[in-house]
Image (cartoon, rainbow, N blue to C red):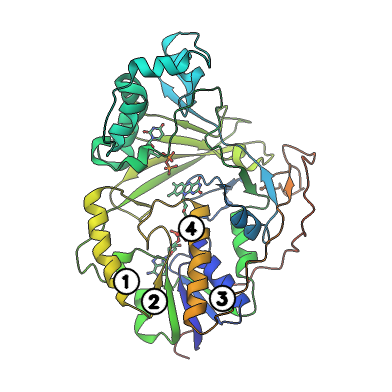
Amino acid sequence: MRVDVLVVGAGFSGAVVAERLASHGKTVLVIDKRSHIGGNAHDRMDAHGVLIHPYGPHIFHTNGRRIAEYLSRFTEWRAYEHRVRAKVGDRLVPIPINIDTVNQVYGLALDEETIAAFFESVREPRSPVRTSEDVVLNAVGRDLYEKFFQGYTRKQWGLDPSQLAASVAARIPVRTNHDDRYFTDTFQHMPLDGYTRLFERMLDHPRIRCEVGVDFFGMRQRIQASHIVYTGPIDAYFEYCYGRLPYRSIQFQHEHLPLSQYQAVGTVNYPNDHDYTRITEFRHLTGQAHAGTSIVREYPCAEGDPYYPVPRPENEALFKRYEALASQATEVTFVGRLAQYRYYNMDQCVGAALKAAESVLARLGHDNVEPVEGSAPRVRASAGARAADGSTDEGKRVGVDEGKRVTPRPGRDAGPVGTGD
Ligand code: FAD
Ligand code: UDP
């Protein structure tokens, strides 16, 4: 089968590019070596009928209105603000560090007037701020650094914070108020029917063919496409010619428990205890009503599927060498967390993919790129994981925008490999 574009990877980056290209008249073959679509954002029911994220908890949040509106063409949403506690000593305290964190850890009674002076008294000023250690010491000083960041980071990355770029720890703010939400983005919602359903709707287009269980490297010689969009690890594409780029992996240990609730918030971080970094309980994220509950523990490791680029100067330098090769390879566009070696959240992948699709369309001779048609997001209080009878933890509507409702279209089965015939 000859197609205009082969898209390697059916995660957010690949699916968005495929949808955009197909909507502009291009024929697209999407392949993924996994047995399913959605990449790391894939979700599914576990053996007990609980909606889980097999590749770890995925909470959608963005300040990008265009991104939220674009995705709203394929899903309605459930409002959800993620909260995280960190186990420090015997207490579970808010992270990001806020006034309550400091008060609970030190038995103080600081308020919005006095917290800044507290941080000023404990911080270790650093200039320049180069590493993740610098970021945290500069903001909150050594004791809070050791209680909340040092152990977690060593587990998560196999590196000390002093060996990681500032951008890693800078993801976690320090608050001078009582806000205990993990994110402060203007749009914080979960797809109402889950991520996989969103992907099914995105890829359900007459000009898109999607084949899972297909490895690009097993069919690369047989490709009949005018262009390739590649969302896998960039070093693999170039056969590791400059050596391997480090990617951090995680082993996910899922467990189902016969309890109505395991923990009070979506995620509990364990900076100092255990080999795992955090435990997430999915019902908080999805709002699903179920007699039992499912949780996941994350054990970071070096070997395994690549999940995280490892932001540090020597890795960036190696990536730049691959990026230079990529800029010479005009037959392929690299996009996404693995291909661009960027610690992207989902919304950033969507943004990068929208941009990549525009450049591919321009390259393939479609210079009148239509703007992304979006829908005003529709938010419902009900859960992403509806039980078989449709019941959810919450029943009432919290607010509905005037946007167009997207009618779900049936997902399509993966067919056999379609190249070369
Ligand atoms: P991926 O989702 O990795 O998709 C790439 C796809 O390419 C994969 O499915 C892979 O199988 C396929 N592929 C690779 N090589 C080949 C090949 N040779 N042949 C065929 N297919 C191939 N982001 C958030 O916004 N919020 C969160 O809460 C959040 N939590 C996260 C938690 C964890 C544990 C992890 C690991 C990530 C989290 N993220 C979160 C980040 C999010 O997963 C990514 O930003 C996003 O899913 C990346 O999309 P992608 O399409 O670029 O890559
Ligand atoms: N981090 C930490 N302690 C925490 C939370 C985060 O040290 O309690 C550091 C750690 O290095 C982590 C990084 O901040 O890898 C980014 O955290 P985030 O929760 O954004 O990680 P992700 O959800 O992407 O795994």
Where disc 4 sits, the SS reads: helix
Extreme residue toward the bottom, this view? 421
Look at the numbered discs 2 and 1 and tell me whether their residues touch, using CB distance below 8 Å.
yes
Look at the numbered discs 3 and 1 and tell me whether their residues touch, using CB distance below 8 Å.
no
Judging depth in this view, the residue of 31 and 79 nearest the camera is 79
Where disc 1 sits, the SS reads: helix
- The residue that mark 3 highlights is 21
Q: Earlier in the sequence, mark 2 or mark 3?
A: 3
Look at the numbered discs 2 and 3 and tell me whether their residues touch, using CB distance below 8 Å.
no
- The residue that mark 2 highlights is 332
Residue type (three-letter) at the residue carrying disc 3: Leu
**Ligand 1 within 8 Å of the CB at mark 4:** yes
- The residue that mark 4 highlights is 349
Q: Is residue 202 left or right of residue 161?
A: right
**Neighbour tally class for label 2: few under 14, some 14-19, many 20 plus, Cα within 10 Å:** some
Look at the numbered discs 4 and 2 and tell me whether their residues touch, using CB distance below 8 Å.
no
**Neighbour tally class for label 1: few under 14, some 14-19, many 20 plus, Cα within 10 Å:** some
Q: Earlier in the sequence, mark 4 or mark 1?
A: 1
Residue 50's label in the rendered image is: none
Extreme residue toward the front, this view? 127
Residue type (three-letter) at the residue carrying disc 2: Val
Q: Residue at x 43, y 35 (%)?
A: 172
Extreme residue toward the left, this view? 242
Q: Is residue 318 left or right of residue 207?
A: left
Q: Earlier in the sequence, mark 2 or mark 1?
A: 1
Residue 191 in view, yes or no: yes
Q: Earlier in the sequence, mark 3 or mark 1?
A: 3
Q: Position of residue 213 (x, y in %)?
A: 46, 70
> Could you say which quadrant of the image residue 242 lies in?
bottom left
Is 176 placed above or below 191 here? above
